[in-house]
Image: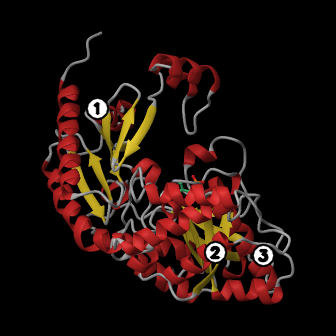
Amino acid sequence: MQTPDYQRLDRAHHLHPFTDFKALGEEGSRIIERAEGVYIHDAEGHRILDGMAGLWCVNLGYGREELVAAATEQLHRLPYYNNFFKTTHPPAVKLAEKLCRLAPAHLNHVFFTGSGSEANDTVLRMVRRYWALKGKPEKQWVIGRENGYHGSTVAGMSLGGMAPMHGQGGPGVPKIAHVRQPYWFGEGRFGEGRPAGQDPEAFGRECAAALEAKIQELGEDQVAAFIAEPVQGAGGAIIPPASYWPAVKAVLAKYDILLVVDEVICGFGRLGEWFGSVHYGLEPDLMPIAKGLSSGYLPIGGVLVGDRVAETLIEEGGEFFHGFTYSGHPACAAVALRNLELMEAEGVVQRVRDDVGPYLAERWAALAGHPLVGEARSLGLIGALELVDPASGERFDSARGVGPLCRDLCFAGGLVMRSVGDTMIISPPLVISHAEIDELMEKARAALDATLARLATPTTP
Ligand code: PMP
């Protein structure tokens, strides 16, 4: 089959995630056929540098034979068995032990799921269960953040703060509230009614104060947990001001509320530590994980559970009525285990922190000199560019679609860079080399130039 054949069948039968089906049908899908290292190949023979590691997940890059072998061996030996009814299997046990060894010391248990969304559904059920067991069943509210992302199941969508998602499909899960996000460029610097001369650090503290105000409004005795990503990923690679997490920690220390740190993107080396929580010195009670856990080779997620919650669930719990057919799936667990072993053996996390992270940071920061770029930020191997109107230095009217235009020009130039509105984001495989970072930079700059040229061209009627 050729590209047009795939496109025709795709249009006829396939509803894609997060997609305007009609618009895609008119345009036609890109068919990605194979990949190796940091490159994907489409059906027409284009080789494209994957600046997004798939969907923030292919941390070890494509084509790792060791992961293929781990899956194959496990599929031969035991392709499926469950962890219900007092049974388990070696890959699940070994992976659980490995994860708890890599995680901060107080996280010693894991509940497996098939995805990050299921991990966050598990979080919601677990925190409410925990407080019920503690004799405080009224502690049910969970506070998330506007523009946070925690998945696409009903609970994941509800915990997340994506307004367009909330706008579809009726009311979400009750007793979930949202507070403002620590997005300096989007809401601090440019926000309406901002105090003149305020700096990002004051803004970070203000966002933490908003959390405290929400806790007081709802009542501490009604609030079960606060959930947040260390760095917001899908929201636009939003790196909080340095003041934010210490101020949030100080707020949470005053109240008896669980901290849930969603590590689905930041976990497994993205920020240069095994977990974003380590980078920011957080001590979460629960850590949802997925994506980089298996480098995306097979679907697996989970929730790492801190001692405080685990002890209560175990000692006082009785049966926890929750779980998935694919919780700890043997082949997925075997691949995840091998993935973590390879990451350890190859010093991948340390390399992000000490080598490629700083290298990318230096090169990426230089893009701030481009007339279209209002801010270039990065941490570890996650980065964002804020596109602004060169004439005013202000953000474009989002209806102009400058971000999506830049994204399409990127793709045409051989680079996957994603747009969240007019924020361009990257999250490349952690194994990317210096030379590949150089190539990424050249292609990103070329796409910015092409975008600028396109904006300067008057559209013909
Ligand atoms: N949490 C975060 C922080 C995520 O970025 C995502 C996915 N982008 C999820 C949860 C949901 O994961 P999944 O798509 O595997 O359900």
Ligand 1 resides in the quarter of the picture at bottom right
Which dot marks residue 225? 2
In this rendering, the answer to whether 225 lies above or below 420 is below
Q: Nearer the viewer, mark 2 or mark 1?
A: 1
Q: From the viewer's perspective, tell me whether residue 133 is left or right of residue 109.
A: right
Task: Residue under label 3, please give it.
Answer: 129
Name the residue rendered at 80%, 72% in the picture: 87
Q: Is residue 262 visible?
A: no
Nearer-the-camera pick, 227 or 442: 442
Within-10-Å neighbours for mark 1: few <14, some 14–19, many 20+? many
In the rendered image, is residue 455 in sight?
A: yes
* Label 1 C-beta lies within 8 Å of the nearest ligand 1 atom: no
Q: Position of residue 71 (x, y in %)?
A: 57, 57
Q: Amino acid at mark 1?
A: Leu
Q: Tell me what residue is drawn at x 75 percent, y 80 percent.
A: 130
Q: Inspect the image, locate mark 3, and give the three-letter code of the amino acid beneath it.
A: Arg
Seen in the picture, residue 189 relative to 209 is either above or below; the reply is above
Percent x, y for residue 260? Answer: 58, 73
Secondary structure state at the residue bearing disc 3 = helix
